[in-house]
Image (cartoon, coloured by chain):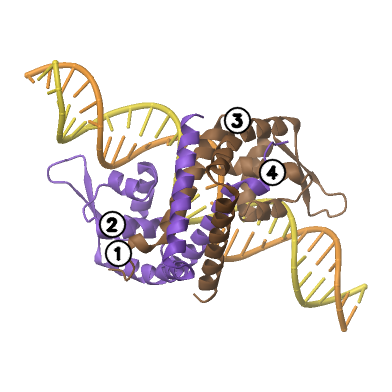
Chain colours: A brown, B purple, C yellow, D orange
DNA sequence: GGGACGATATCAAAGCTTTGATGATTATCA
DNA sequence: TGATAATCATCAAAGCTTTGATATCGTCCC
């Protein structure tokens, strides 16, 4: 059927690792009443108060439309607030509310357990190696995409 | 805010790599009129004719409910057919149709370009290293999840 | 000033995913 | 045989994501 056996496809290994990661994080942040995308948005928001929705989308690696949905749900629950930018009338400044900050800290305390476990699994050299190999994956993917 | 800087969180690197991978594959299989989940289902189906929806879901690492939606869309377009199992009346046997096989081959020809580029980026030792490091990630995640 | 350009936000449609719950069927075992 | 457990399919609700299209606003440059 295909000219490449499934065992050779590294993509499956990456996907499996990411899927285990996101599943674990989902369980972790759910205790704070958050989804993973909501947690990611709040996390980025904490480091960039007043950021625009489009910029937040870029930070979270999703489309602006996807981020709009996430922000809508977060705003309905009072975890973020969006106010018109004083100069750029077309921009909505988004900020964490106090309940949003609390939710983020609750979720992050549990999410860090996962990240800490991964970090502790490797020494510095191994960590750098994994990072470098994943980065080369990205380069190869981009290279292949451009000539698709 | 947090006791772990974002730079130390390896999860972001894994997520980024997977996101680039899935985005590239999305572009690749779209030429065949398929989504990535549809492509994954057809791919697994090609190797396991007559498999049940639940088993297919396990093979694709999704829930049975998610697979139901994917199969419904594939069936509406005539790419798969589902027939009652002769003995187990509760099971629907799913098989590729001829148009489904054609779509899969068209999609796979392009998806392989991505996987081939990744495979060619590494020599055997690097590939084994990446696999091993990702596997250890999975172990660490499962270990942390169990005590969450 | 006025037009091109880029960034922002938003509406709409289609599809995927998860959690939770339900009902039907088959297998296992006392 | 009859009860328990496991498997399968499905309905429902909520949320995320993408692609495509549209409207507004600010900046740059002629």
Placement of A61 over or under A107, stated as above or below: below
Q: Pointer 3 indicates a residue of which chain? A: A
Q: Of discs 4 and 1, which sits in the foreground?
A: 4
- Residue A43 shown left or right of residue B73 in the figure: right
Screen quadrant of the N terminus of chain A: bottom left
Is the same chain shared between marks 4 and 2? yes
Tell me whether circle 1 and circle 2 mark residues in contact (CB < 8 Å): yes
Q: Nearer the viewer, mark 3 or mark 4?
A: 4
Q: Is residue B81 left or right of residue B121?
A: left
Query: What is the spatial separation of the Cα atoms under label 4 and label 2, in whole angstroms?
Result: 43 Å
Check disc 1 and report the residue beneath it: B100
Instruction: Label 3, secondary structure: give it.
Output: loop
Residue bearing mark 4? B5
Cα gap from disc 3 to disc 4, whole angstroms = 20 Å
Q: Secondary structure at mark 1?
A: helix
How far from the left and from the top, in percent, is residue B120?
Answer: 45, 71
Q: Earlier in the sequence, mark 4 or mark 2?
A: 4
Which of label 1 and label 2 is nearer to you?
A: 2
Q: Residue tagged by mark 2?
A: B45
Measuring from the top left, give residue A40's x and y in whole percent.
63, 44
Q: Which residue is mark 3?
A: A32
Q: Nearer the viewer, residue B105 or A138?
A: A138
Element at label 4: loop
Could you confirm whether marks 4 and 1 are on the same chain? Answer: yes
Q: Is residue D24 left or right of residue B21?
A: right
- Distance from the alpha carbon under mark 3 to that under mark 2: 38 Å
The picture quadrant where one finds residue A31 is top right
Q: Nearer the viewer, mark 1 or mark 3?
A: 3
Q: Where A132 falls versus A93 (above or below)?
A: below
Q: Which mark is residue B79?
A: none
């Amino acid at each position: 059927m295909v000219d490449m056996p499934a065992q050779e496809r590294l993509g499956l290994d990456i996907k499996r690792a990411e899927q285990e990661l996101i599943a674990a994080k989902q369980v972790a942040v759910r205790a704070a009443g958050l989804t993973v995308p909501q947690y990611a948005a709040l996390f980025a928001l904490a480091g960039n108060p007043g950021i625009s929705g489009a910029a937040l989308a870029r930070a979270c690696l999703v489309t602006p439309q996807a981020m709009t949905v996430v922000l809508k749900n977060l705003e309905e629950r009072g975890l973020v607030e969006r106010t018109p930018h004083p100069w750029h009338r077309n921009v909505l400044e988004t900020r964490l509310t106090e309940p949003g900050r609390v939710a983020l800290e609750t979720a992050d305390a549990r999410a860090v357990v996962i990240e800490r476990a991964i970090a502790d699994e490797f020494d510095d050299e191994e960590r750098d190696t994994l990072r470098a190999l994943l980065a080369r994956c990205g380069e190869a993917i981009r290279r292949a995409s451009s000539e698709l």
